[in-house]
Amino acid sequence: MSILVCGGAGYIGSHTVYKLIEQGNDVIIVDNLQSGHLKAVNKNAKFYKGDIRDSKFLEKVFYENKIESVLHFAANSLVGESMVKPLLYFNNNVYGMQILLETMVKFNIKNIVFSSTAAVYGEPKRIPIVESDDTNPTNTYGETKLTMEKMMKWCNKAYGINFVALRYFNVAGALEDGSIGEDHHPETHLIPLILQVPLKKREFITVFGTDYPTADGTCIRDYIHVLDLADAHIKAVKYLENGNESNIFNLGNGIGFSVKEMIDAAKEVTKKDIKVVLGEKRAGDPAQLVASSEKARKILEWSPKYTNIKEIVKDAWTWHETHPNGFED
Ligand code: UDP
């Protein structure tokens, strides 16, 4: 039996595939390579290039393979872009999920692990955030992911499809040997942008807002290593394959770091000076997002191994230093 990974050529998908294969699983990857990279496709997986919205294509994949579980990473994920192109996000994310679920129903596949996000919560009422807290997304991206969670909930009731939704906080880092890593176009995430300064690809890093109600005035986020996420996905697949009920889990380290603290960590890791410019707030940025991952720790028996922020930045640096132009190098 195989595990189908939709979006297995993307950042989190490719790291999860690496770990799945390392642990002896048979993996099928589907990716349209819109934001994923051919060079990130694991050579030990079977790869189909195509779009999950193409039902004929997806049916062929399910027909040709004995799939037991699906890991679903294939989605658009840029918050800013989602606000100016909401229909693109509803089409790729929500309609894509519809076709995937319809195909699962057709082929009687019962398990799906879904890549969700802390963006489903919106502005949190309390920190740390727990899974039962209100979900009021403040951007289209978060809204599409919440809708996708709800689609799975109703398909669970109607068709017995079991799901785990993993709500990640700020994903960072790379495979320790630097062979795969984060490569987004455009790049919008803090850690890769900071590291572009010592790489001389950018002159300075702009801090978005310095008067937030936090100790140093900059936003606080919960950074989690991509390999810890990969581990959580594999635990979630096993959880479903063992017959457990559908569930939702936050994934974070439970410790917040400010933008300034992240810049300091990057200075220490790279041993280079990093020029900083203090800028305006970015629209829609909550002051603090920190996860309670107690539920995942208890039920999935997951615990993050990369709890030192410098270790996370170090692995990101190993990747970026050896691949300053991402997978194009
Ligand atoms: N940020 C920043 N400068 C940048 C990019 C990001 O100050 O050039 C801040 C952003 O406002 C947020 C944090 O860094 O508080 C993390 O942003 P990112 O886009 O990486 O992730 P998000 O929290 O939006 O998912």
Image (cartoon, rainbow, N blue to C red):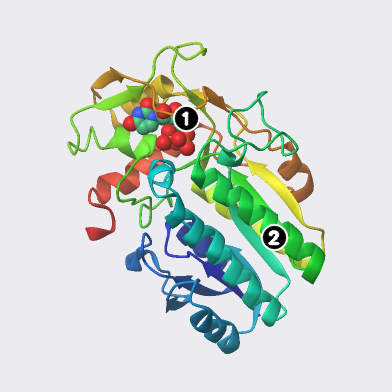
Q: For marks 1 and 2, give the CA distance.
A: 27 Å
What residue appears at the point 52 percent right and 12 percent down from the top-left corner?
213
Does 199 sit left or right of 83 as displayed? Answer: left
Tell me which image quadrant ligand 1 sits in.
top left
Q: Quadrant of the C terminus?
A: bottom left
Could you say where residue 44 lies in the image, as x and y percent from the top left?
Answer: 46, 75
Which amino acid type is marked by label 1? Gly
Q: Is residue 184 visible?
A: yes
Q: Using the rendered view, name the quadrant where residue 244 is placed.
A: bottom right
Q: Using the rendered view, name the quadrant where residue 160 is placed.
A: bottom right
Which amino acid type is marked by label 2? Met
> Is the residue 164 above or below the residue 294 in the image?
below
Numbered label tally: 2
- Furthest residue to the bottom? 64
Q: Nearer the viewer, residue 190 or 302?
A: 190
Q: Are marks 1 and 2 in contact (CB under 8 Å)?
A: no
Q: Nearer the viewer, residue 320 or 188?
A: 188
Could you say where residue 76 lies in the image, as x and y percent from the top left?
Answer: 44, 55
Residue highlighted by disc 1: 284
Lower position in the chain sequence, tag 1 or tag 2: 2
Q: Is residue 236 visible?
A: no
Residue highlighted by disc 2: 152
Q: Is mark 2 within 8 Å of ligand 1?
A: no
SS category of the residue bearing label 2: helix
Could you say where residue 170 lies in the image, as x and y percent from the top left?
Answer: 50, 38
SS category of the residue bearing label 1: loop
